[in-house]
Image (cartoon, rainbow, N blue to C red):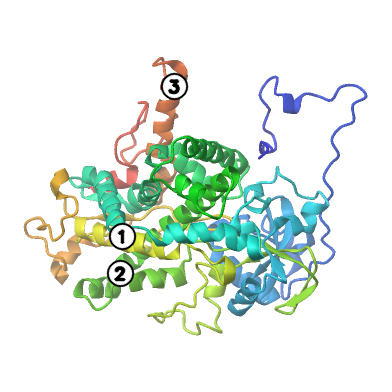
Amino acid sequence: MTTPVPPEGALPPPGCPAHVPAASGTPAAPARPRPDYSGVPAPEGRDPATEVDNPNIGPGRARRLNGPDAERDQQGLYDTLRLEYGEVAPVLLPRDVPAWLVLGHEENRFVCAHPELFTTDGREWRLLQDGTVGPDHPMAPIFMWQPVCAFVEGEEHERLRKPLEENLRVIDLRELRRLVQTGTYTLLNDLCEEGFCDLTEDYCERLPMIVLLGLFGMSHLYDDRFLEAARDLIKGTETANASNEHLMKLFRAEVERAREEPGDNLPSQLLAHPAGMSPREVSEHLRIVLIAAYETTANLLANAMRILLVQMEVRGRVGAGRLNIYEAIEQALWDEPPFSAMLGRYALQDVELGGRRIRKGDAVMLGYAAGNVDTRVRPELDAPVRDNRSHLAFGRGPHACPGQYLGRQLCQLALDDLLAWFPDMRLAVPSAQLRWSGSLLSRHLVELPVRFEPRSQRDEESIGTFGVPLPKGVNLFSSSEEEQDLMPVEVPEGILEAERKAGEWRAAKKRRERAERDGGGGAAEPLPVEATAGGAESGALLPPPRRPLGAWLRR
């Protein structure tokens, strides 16, 4: 991968060879051609006056998928696109690159089921062929061709996919449960005495990667930088290429180690498979499996837990045994699919889809979240889905997610364990105050704060034990009087803003590690002064152990 292009206004480091002025007589690199927007259909019912200086609308009057509207209300953007264009809409990717977004459920399934019309091979993208987009684009890690099963069709697809399916299918559920329980203990035990935690940051964003790396025999790779790179890779940011290269460097080293000393790990198993995967194919598949599995599971875990907390009728029935956690997971897969959209189909010929003419070489995005709320398949969005698995969350057709069974099992075990630790937990803020962050391909909860009765920490011997007695006087389902003590409280916007800006533990930990690594224990880079719940200035290398929201809720 090439180094990402710096954002506008950014200065290159002194002496950077990539930014040395061209010598006299040396021709400069040709500028990339501008995309052709002439084929973009006009929206219906939109007032052109609303498009003046509107950051959500770009060339051809198409809407941007990385604009403010998408970040603030992704599903609202999809609804707007459906009203303006129907089931297939023109959209703009980062740097105003045009593509099509499939919104309809039936249309999404049609694209997935017909690889002879829509291939996953990014080399068929016309804008890549003519140089309009290249390996420096923020989404290059997603669309640039790689020797993986997700980018090929036919026999080659079967050859590369079979080793993945076989290794993901034989996961030892006892080992999976042990890893979930050990990871839960590691993440939550220090929080027992506080009575408060943010499930998104403290649990849902961390546990899946801990478990997946443990299952694949690569636990030593886990750290905050690995975690951040995994999330950044699919966001379409200007740093996505650098994040991709950081991860690939680690995976290539893992494959080389497996070649020299085969062991009980996923790289060794893929190398030894009769399919004859090359070292490069193995390292690329490690990235595909880990990143896709992590993003899917982290978002699914947070969304399913939100359902259990917000819908009290569901939460009660979980405890009463009339609705199991697995069904709550299926509801989350309908309402908030882990990937809201996915770039990765390219038309092999002119074809009509949803009343729109897709030209040969056009890029097509699958709209999982939009398809899941198509009124043709879900006329009543508030109705429970029960055992209906016709959602699009894991894709469809020959390229459907090969690890969906593992993802469901991991989430079910994680929710089981979480409810065993804190069976009395409730949302710490009203559900209306929960905030979401939207990126190009996914949407996830910024935080999921919960409160519970403080309790003593557990011994390591308690890992894997269930039915641990609750603190004295606490019942699994509180009476109406007791529940008043655990009702959500309105949190001032200033506290939520301070919480958002703090970025606390991960950012501060990175500064400390960077200072220790670069300065050999010398003076550390000072932290910026940040607002806290009590108004105190944060001048220490690490901020207080809990965040502003936690301090507010302890009042």
Q: Nearer the viewer, mark 3 or mark 1?
A: 1
Q: Horizontal placement of 81 versus 460: left or right?
A: right
Identity of the residue furthest to the front in this view: 274
Mark number for residue 173? 1
Give whichever of discs 2 and 1 has the lower sequence position.
Answer: 1
Seen at 44% across and 21% down, the residue is 517
Q: Residue 341 appears in which quarter of the rendering?
A: bottom right
Q: Position of residue 19 (x, y in %)?
A: 75, 27
Circles 3, 1 touching at the beta carbon (< 8 Å): no
Which residue is labeled 3 in the image? 517
Q: Are marks 2 and 1 in contact (CB under 8 Å)?
A: no
Question: Does 399 sit above or below residue 221?
Answer: below
The amino acid type of the residue labelled 2 equals Ile
User: Is residue 220 visible to the viewer in this orientation of the structure?
Assistant: yes
The structure residue drawn at horizontal position 19% and vertical position 75%, both measured from the top left corner, is 320
Considering depth in this image, is 548 or 322 the residue closer to the camera? 322
N-terminal label among 2 and 3: 2
Q: Is residue 325 above or below residue 266?
A: below
Residue 37 shows which numbered tag?
none
Cα distance, mark 2 to mark 1?
17 Å
Location of residue 420 (image quadrant): bottom left
Q: Residue at x 33, y 50 (%)?
A: 203
Looking at the rendered structure, the kind of residue marked 1 is: Leu
* Residue 537 x, y percent position in the rendering: 36, 30
Dots 2, 3 in contact, CB < 8 A: no
Q: CA distance from mark 2 to mark 3?
A: 44 Å
Q: Which residue is mark 2?
A: 325
Q: Position of residue 101 (x, y in %)?
A: 66, 67
Is 446 or 68 nearer to us in this picture?
446
